[in-house]
Image: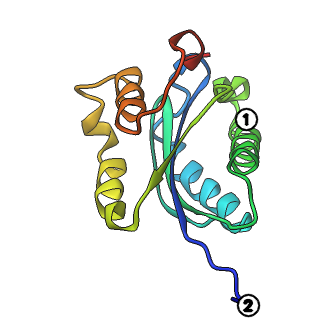
Amino acid sequence: MAQSLAKILVHLVFSTKDRYPYLIAEVRPELHAYAATVLKSSESPAITINSVADHIHVLCSLSRSRAICDLIEELKTSTSKWIKTKGGILEKFHWQNGYGAFSVSQSQVESVKTYIAAQEKHHRRMTFEEEFRSFLHKHEMEYDERYVWT
């Protein structure tokens, strides 16, 4: 085959350092737009992005020429620098060290988009920690509780 083709859909989840509620409602739409620009320039276009005060969800199509860890590093570094320019308490902004990256099949895109869009409602009944553990269990990922939240 002469042409290399790939479609790898990924649901990314990561939080602010110590889950501090930096992501105030006023900054979120701009953050989502900025993150989408970073992803597009990395040839990993966003399908949907949403956040709440202490974490963000991104559904994107991973570039066939980028490692997931490199994409996330670029996304977190760029958005962190951008948020800090907003001044005030945001000058102290940091993302957590780790992240979650979960595969999504094309048949599940609409349900993942709906899930991501409903973050505010969802987190009225479930904490970030409970949500993240449920992703880890659903995707049968082994983890060490001591290191997940740092």
Residue sitting at x 64%, y 25%: 96
Question: Farthest residue toward the top?
Answer: 146
Residue sitting at x 62%, y 16%: 150
Residue 2, label in figure: 2
Residue picked out by circle 1: 84
Dot 1 and dot 2 residues touching (CB under 8 Å): no
Of labels 1 and 2, earlier in sequence is: 2
Number of numbered discs on residues: 2
- Most foreground residue, 54 or 137: 137
Give the image location of residue 43, x and y in percent: 70, 69
Please say which color scheme the image uses. Answer: rainbow
Element marked by disc 1: helix
Give the image location of residue 131, x and y in percent: 36, 29
Using residue 47 as the reference point, say whether residue 44 is left or right of it: right
Whole-number angstrom distance, CA of label 1 to CA of label 2: 45 Å
- Most foreground residue, 135 or 115: 135
Circle 2: residue type: Ala
Residue sitting at x 25%, y 38%: 121
- Most foreground residue, 90 or 17: 17
Q: Is residue 150 above or below residue 77?
A: above
- Most foreground residue, 40 or 29: 40
